[in-house]
Image (spheres, rainbow, N blue to C red):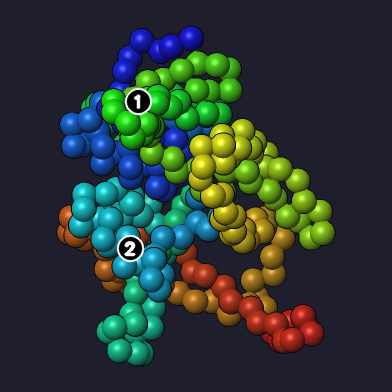
Amino acid sequence: MIYPQKYDVIVVGGGHAGIEASLAAARLGCQTLLLTMNLDTIGFMSCNPAIGGLGKGQLVKEIDALGGEMAKAIDKTAIQFRRLNTKKGPAVQSSRAQADRESYRLYMKYTLENQSGLDIKQALVDKILIKDISFSGRSGLVQRKVRGVETYIGERFLSKCVIITPGTFLNGVIHIGLKHFFGGRMGDFSSTRLAQNLRNLGFRIGRFKTGTCPRLDGRSINFSSLTPQEGDVHPIPFSFSTEKVEEGSFLPCYITWYNKKGNRLDS
């Protein structure tokens, strides 16, 4: 089945990259469609609930300078701001903010839903649709052009441009100790058919590796044996458009150390 609406741009994936790509395309006047496996996990921050840091902090500033949303979102939803390497030279200093994952997700979902020229649909994309165009003459050259995507249930969305931002979901595998199984993240599907389709089209598929920290119930942690690390009292905003971060009840981080044998040094 072919969806009746045709788009200028289709974005596959609703993580950080997919959010920025779909917003940028729509704000440039392109009729845009964002396809994601689950509408409720847009901007979910499944790997690390923080924005910025060394290297990545500069990237967030560059996205913001180009009209992106990430810096604005963290300025609104952070639970701690901290300037890193303040005892060193300015070339190696950077901003980092810990995020309220739920607030960040809801902020991004609200922003996407209220962006004109942008449609959002829940779907698992399995295939990039390609049209071969033959050139006349003796050369026999064939140009391949994208014409849209096909989902797991056979629905086709047509577009002259497709942006793929699958993150860890593309042929994703979850490793827990020595056990491993397919999955984009715990509880979600892995996009295996799209990975195979891209191979068939001649692309080389690599592995995007990430390490997800464990989620612990705060009531199960003895914070008295840990070292608190407070954030900045007067935080510097990430976004150039944020005049001032609203100073509220920010939370501290807590630090612990281990030796080479795996024994805690602060116990």
Residue 251 vertical position relative to residue 74 in the rendered view, above or below: below
User: In the image, 116: left or right of 98?
Assistant: left
x, y (%) of residue 86? Answer: 34, 84
How many marks the image carries: the answer is 2
Residue at 79% in and 85% down: 261
Give the quadrant of residue 232: bottom left
x, y (%) of residue 63? Answer: 28, 55
Q: How crowded is mark 1: few (under 14 residues within 10 Å), some or many (20 or more)?
A: few
- Residue type of the residue flagged with mark 2: Leu
Give the quadrant of residue 121: top left
User: In the image, 259: left or right of 92?
Assistant: right
Q: Is residue 17 visible?
A: yes
Q: Is residue 33 visible?
A: no
Residue at 68% in and 48% down: 173
Instruction: Depth check: give the residue in front, 120 or 86.
Output: 120
Residue at 50% in and 23% down: 150
User: In the image, 209: left or right of 166?
Assistant: right
Tell me the SS state at disc 1: strand
Q: Mark 1 points at which residue?
A: 133
Sooner in the amino-acid sequence: mark 2 or mark 1: 2
Instruction: Depth check: give the residue in front, 49 or 233.
Output: 49
- In the image as oriented, which residue stretches furthest toward the right? 178
Q: Distance between the residues labelled 2 and 1?
A: 38 Å
Instruction: Depth check: give the residue in front, 257 or 146.
Output: 146
- Residue type of the residue flagged with mark 1: Ile
Q: Where does the C terminus fall, quadrant-wise?
A: bottom right
Q: Which of marks 2 and 1 is in front?
A: 1
Residue 76 vertical position relative to residue 19 in the rendered view, above or below: below
Label drawn at residue 59: 2
Give the quadrant of residue 15: top left
Q: Residues within 10 Å of mark 2 (few under 14, many from 20)?
A: few
